[in-house]
Amino acid sequence: MAHLDKLFGIDGPVLNYYSHISSTPTLPLELVAGQSVWVDTMVADDVSAAAEDGRSPEITLTVRFDKPIQPGQLRLRLGGNDLPDVRQAEDGALECRVASQLVIQGPNRLEVSFLDSKVSAAIASVKLSEVRLSVHYP
């Protein structure tokens, strides 16, 4: 499975029938102006080692909310590092490329917060409903 494309994500709610055998889902999480939320995404690949071996993986972080959010309204940090160049995907989700040296094998902590100066009353509270980290090996 090494050097094959992967999609890592965070669990959301499961079908009601299976809820008795499932753990409490991480998502959705409520994001409120003035506060941050943190979620850990488990990554099985050692993408830093792959990059050192000459296989430069293309890594994309995708986040989705229950209300429309513009890229300039949020701050995304992975492992304490700001993620620049967040853009809106065609389906309304927010995406950004992630440098391979920022992704570790194991839990990767994502911090999401509003940029205080960009928050309007209409979006002062939203729910983070999806987090995906896709790794593509060209």
Image (cartoon, rainbow, N blue to C red):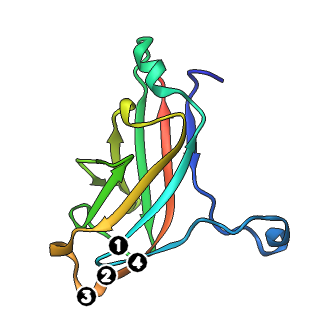
The answer to which of 32 and 123 lies nearer the viewer is 32
Residue 138 visible from this viewpoint: no
- From the image, state whether disc 1 or disc 3 is nearer to you: 3
* Label 2 to label 4: alpha-carbon separation: 6 Å
- Residue 51: where, in percent of width, then height? 41, 19
- Contact check, label 4 and label 3, Cβ < 8 Å: no
- Residue 28: where, in percent of width, then height? 54, 71
Q: Residue at x 42, y 54 (%)?
A: 110
**Residue that badge 2 annotates:** 123
Amino acid bearing label 1: Pro
Screen quadrant of the C terminus: top left
- The local crowd at label 2, few if under 14, some if 14 to 19, many if 20 or more residues have their Cα within 10 Å, is some
User: Is 62 drawn above or below residue 70 in the view shown?
Assistant: above
Element at badge 4?
A: strand
- From the image, state whether disc 1 or disc 2 is nearer to you: 2
Screen quadrant of the N terminus: top right
Label 4 vs 1, first from the N-terminus: 1
Q: Residue at x 22, y 82 (%)?
A: 120
**Residue that badge 3 annotates:** 121
